[in-house]
Structures are given as C-alpha cells and as structure tokens.
Amino acid sequence: MIVKDLEFVKFITKTKVQAQVKALAEMINADYQSKAPVFLPILNGSFMFASDLMKQIDVPNKISFVKVSSYSGTASTGQLKTLVGLELSLFNQDVIIVEDIVDTGLTLQKIVNELKELGTRSVEVVALLRKPPAREKKMDVKYVGFDIENDFVLGYGLDYDGHGRNLTDIYRMKPTNSENPAL
Ligand code: IMP
C-alpha cells in the first residue's frame, strides 16, 4: 500500500490489535478496582486506541485528551512541546497516560515529569506499541500492547505526515532492501 510517497505492508491485523486492547483493559480493571483513575490519552495518535480501550474499562474513571507532538515525517525532530489541553485538576489523582507508541520515550518522560509536578498520586502508562529505544532505557511503561522493532508504523491512529490515521490494521514501512518484509 502506498501512502503519500512510501510503501507500507500489513504488520498487525485489527483482530490482533483488538485482542491486545482487551487484554490491556482487563489488566487495568484488575489493578484499579478500588480506584477512579483519570485517563490522559495523548492526541492525535492515541485517539483510536483510547476509544477502544475506554469502552472496556469498567472502573469509575474520567478522561481528558491532551496534546504534545515531537514528530515530523518519519524521524523525531527532538523538539518537544509542552502538554496542552489539560482541563481537570490532577492533584491527588491516579493518572493513566494513554499513548499510541513509545519510541525514544522523550515525549513520555516530559509528560510524566510535568504530571508529577501537579501533585498526582500515581502516574502509569499504557502504550499500544513500544520500540527498542524505550525498552533499552527501561522506561517505566506498565502496560504495553506490542513490543516492536525500529520500523516506522502507520494506522490505528498513527500517521505518516498526517496520512493513514484511520486505518484499522497497523502497517509498517516496507524496507527498501528486503525481499520479504511482510509478516
Ligand atoms: P518519542 O518521544 O520518540 O517516544 O515519540 C513518541 C511519539 O512519536 C508518538 O506518540 C508518535 O506520535 C510518534 N511516533 C513514534 N514512532 C512512530 C511511528 O513509527 N509512526 C508514527 N508515529 C510515531
């Protein structure tokens, strides 16, 4: 499949994605039984993941979508913006950040630090995808859907220059020098 100027191949089917989202929700439901967490999905990338995840959360909760962006094209620009759009007081709250993907972890680290300064009781992270840099740094991501390699991925909220967010399967960029990149 060509998106803009790059070729992508199917990587994680929507069936697998949905099964993993359900498993993550079940873990969160079990861990937060006597709590009422505040979910902070990070826009734009987590909109589809957050929507599917929240449908399966059965503990009392609040949701506030926030935004921060560090990407342009397929490589991190390293320019971090601050967290915007927070409309709830998080003082003494159990917060769960909902991320589409953790790559270098810079975005996440920045958000977690900002949230701790607001006097939160606890901050955990649920990420659908995690790439090796975050794994190697031992970033504290409590709930991870899929550990993937360093491929650029697209779909299920993730974009390539604004394209492809609405795809329900997850695709990865086709390596230019590989003959059989598809799974
Ligand atoms: P980090 O700060 O390097 O961890 O970058 C995390 C953010 O970069 C994610 O929330 C995504 O918006 C974006 N991102 C990282 N990897 C990809 C990718 O493979 N496809 C699309 N967006 C990505």
Image: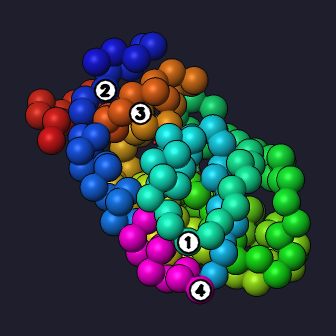
**Magenta residue span:** 25-34
| Residue at the image point whose x is 63% and y is 52% from the top | 41
What whole-number distance in Å separates the C-alpha atoms at marks 1 and 4?
8 Å
Ligand 1 within 8 Å of the CB at mark 4: no
Which sits earlier in the primary sequence, circle 1 or circle 3?
A: 1
Find disc 3 in the rendering and name its residue.
155
Q: What type is the residue that disc 2 sits on?
A: Phe
Vertical order, 164 against 67 (above or below) = above
Task: Give the residue number, with chain letter if any, for mark 1.
Answer: 59
Which mark is nearer the camera, 1 or 2?
A: 1
* Residue 152 location (% of width, % of height): 41, 39
* Residue 34 marker: 4
Q: Nearer the viewer, mark 3 or mark 2?
A: 3
In reply to whether residue 15 is colored magenta, the answer given is no
Q: Is disc 4 surrounded by few (<14), some (14 to 19) or many (20+) residues within 10 Å?
A: few
First along the sequence among labels 3 and 2: 2
Whether the residue under disc 1 has CB within 8 Å of ligand 1: no
Q: CA distance from mark 2 to mark 4?
A: 43 Å
Mainly helix, strand or loop, the magenta region?
helix
Q: Given this view, does label 2 or label 4 mark the residue nearer the observer?
A: 4
Q: Residues within 10 Å of mark 3 (few under 14, many from 20)?
A: many
Which residue does the numbered mark 2 point to in the structure image? 8
In terms of depth relative to the viewer, which is nearer, 23 or 156? 23
| Residue 75 position within the rendered picture, expressed as x and y whole percent measured from the top left | 55, 38
Amino acid at the residue labelled 3: Gly
Give SS at disc 4: loop
